[in-house]
Amino acid sequence: MKISIIGASGKVGSEITRLLAEQTSFGSTVDLVLYTPNNVKKISGQLQDLQESLLMIGKSFSNHVVFHPSNNINDIKGSNLIIIAAGLFASKEEKEAYKLLDPTGRTIQSFKNAPLVANLCYEIKKIAPKSDVLILTNQSDTMCEVARSVLEKQKVYALGCYLDTLRFKKIFAEMTSLKPSDFDATILGFHSKNMFLNEATFKTNKKIKNLEKIKQEALERTILRGKEISDMQKDIHHTEINSGSSKLPAASIFNIVKAYSQKDAAITIPLNRLLEKSEKELIKEDVTIGVQLPCQVSYKKITPVPANLTEKDVDSLRQALSSFIIELNAFSENVQLLQGKA
């Protein structure tokens, strides 16, 4: 089993490496390529530091995971799964310029990262044309569409609502004093304000007063949680330094790597994927873009799981799609406008 992480020297990539180095649950060997174009010594140093820190506390290092730090993109050849965690950050000047087109400032990440993701996908298409591809780079749903436009014949997925599902569960549990084992919940749609609670799969074995109101408030808080974490982590002396969440995305990728590389470790989680025929029939639209919907991640494959949707869920999915398509079109127009000025 071979898995490659592109952008392995960044915050999320480094945290993924740490989790995989510390784990003791893998029974089958994973060859893990840690690719970075410029920081391969940084990765090697982190691995040595990890090894010595685990030795200090009497724990073993790299159980059934063989790390391959690399600055040669050709080393991703033959990967079963490629994870794109690479990302760029806009300068203050770029943020100000982009605000003229998008006053919310939300899509500046996509504008900055789209060329990077496209170029990486052209390399993947050439070097590893049979690999599954998973996008972490923000904004993940938009970057997933960029990747699919290049990798027409490959399976492309994006992380997003897997994180939101965990965050919703934590918030809902805090609001109701329930244990996570007392209820089940899944967030679908998009990793943005266009997410929604999957009503068909929401279950609880407890009686909760004002349940609908609490669910809605928990969802609204979930939408804001990523920014809240980012703002809380800012260094007051260096507020310009990126402070986004890295622990939860890395933990999510750890679970995905485990499920994909180990037998009998399958998980069912939401990922951005193309709609199944039955789902298109439910919403009565021939949608060609991806949505965060259930997938089973199992040994060497990621398989769509047809979504269980109530009428309310169908309406929520339609609204989420409509809103995202408008945002995607506006983003494409903004990119063309800025390219015209260049």
Image: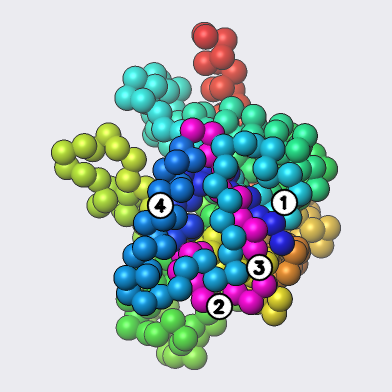
User: Residue visible at 79% across and 42% down?
Assistant: 129
User: Residue visible at 48% across and 64% down?
Assistant: 21
**Can residue 30 be found in the magenta stretch?**
yes
Q: Dot 3, how many residues are within 10 Å of its Cα: few (below 14), some (14-19), or many (20+)?
A: some
In what element is the residue under mark 3? loop
293 above or below 83? below
| Mark 4: amino acid | Gln
Q: Which residue is mark 4?
A: 46
What mark, if any, has residue 252 been given in the picture?
A: none
**Can residue 52 be found in the magenta stretch?**
no
Where is residue 137? Give x, y as percent.
53, 43
The quadrant holding residue 339 is top right
Where is residue 249? Give x, y as percent.
47, 57
Residue at the top extreme of this rendering: 341
In what element is the residue under mark 4? helix
The quadrant holding residue 66 is bottom right
- Front-most of 324 and 3? 3
Q: Which residue is mark 3?
A: 29
Label 3 and label 4: CA atoms lie apart by 21 Å
| Mark 2: amino acid | Ser
- Front-most of 216 and 292? 292
Q: Earlier in the sequence, mark 2 or mark 4?
A: 2
Q: Is residue 265 visible?
A: yes
Label 2 and label 3: CA atoms lie apart by 11 Å
Q: Which residue is mark 1?
A: 79
Q: How many marks?
A: 4
Magenta residues, start to end: 19-38
Q: Which one is closest to the eye, mark 2 or mark 4?
A: 4
| Mark 1: amino acid | Ser
